[in-house]
Image: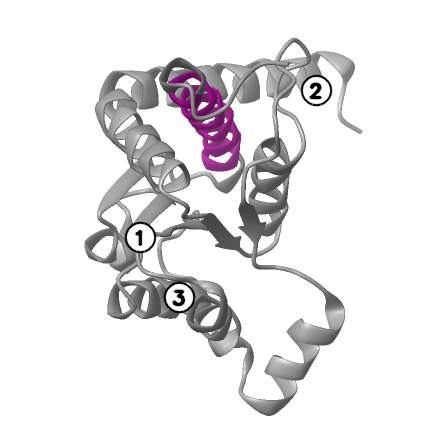
Amino acid sequence: MLSDDSLRDHVTRLFEASIETKRTVLATQTEPLLRLARLVANSLANGGKLLLCGNGGSAADAQHLAAELLIRLRPHINRAGLPAIALAMDSSTMTACGNDYGFDEIYARMVQALGRPGDVLIGITTSGKSPNVLLALEAARAAGIHTAGFLGGTGGPALPLCDIALVASSPDTGRIQESHITLGHALMELIEEILLESGVIVNR
């Protein structure tokens, strides 16, 4: 049976690894984060929208971040909703595509149907290898949609498909996802700040 000391040590190692991964992300990914914030803010200011997709925990992150723009991000900022769509939408759409065309096609079909030139797609994949995210990024490029990735490790095959990539360089899925949601919150706050400063949105 594991002792409490052993379990405490495990928690300490987990937190230290998470902190170290975030320190690396801060040191290496700030500039692409700023570029992505300006890209998304410019798209929204010009009538575009943000699309997000991922699988498992990354699908949940996509939904979480879309909600931050659609509804509210910070309690002291009361502004109109901003157009953001998480593509892991509903069980009918997901299972219909899985049954009729295959699960790999789900996000590409949504990008083709819902995306317009000038929109931004963020694909979230800790491995950089998720087939449905890769196909979505390819579909976005073909449609004139800007592509971005929240990736892990070395970025994988998704890296060259992204106009801008934010990479959490860790082999551990949990640490990557923790960095992704921190990057995501930072991205949404930067977008909001840029749009407030430019007068596109107002704090009511």
Judging depth in this view, the residue of 67 and 172 nearest the camera is 67
Q: Position of residue 21 (x, y in %)?
A: 39, 23
The quarter holding residue 87 reads bottom right
The tally of labels here is 3
Which residue has dot 2 on it?
A: 7
For residue 35, side relative to residue 64 (left or right): left
Q: Residue at x 75, y 25 (%)?
A: 2
- The stretch drawn in magenta includes residue 187: yes
Mark 1 closeness class: few <14, some 14–19, many ≥20 residues within 10 Å: many
How far is mark 3 from mark 2, CA to CA? 41 Å
Judging depth in this view, the residue of 132 and 155 nearest the camera is 132
Q: Earlier in the sequence, mark 1 or mark 2?
A: 2
Q: Is residue 6 visible?
A: yes
Identify residue type, mark 1.
Gly
User: Residue 118 has which mark?
Assistant: 1
How far is mark 3 from mark 1, CA to CA? 15 Å
Q: Callout 2: helix, strand or loop?
A: helix
User: Residue 136 has which mark?
Assistant: 3
The quarter holding residue 15 reads top right
Q: Callout 3: helix, strand or loop?
A: helix
Q: Residue at x 48, y 75 (%)?
A: 109
Q: Residue at x 62, y 16 (%)?
A: 74
Identify residue type, mark 2.
Leu
How far is mark 1 from mark 2, CA to CA? 49 Å
- The stretch drawn in magenta includes residue 144: no
Nearer the observer, disc 1 or disc 2? 1
Identify residue type, mark 3.
Ala
Q: Position of residue 185 (x, y in %)?
A: 51, 25
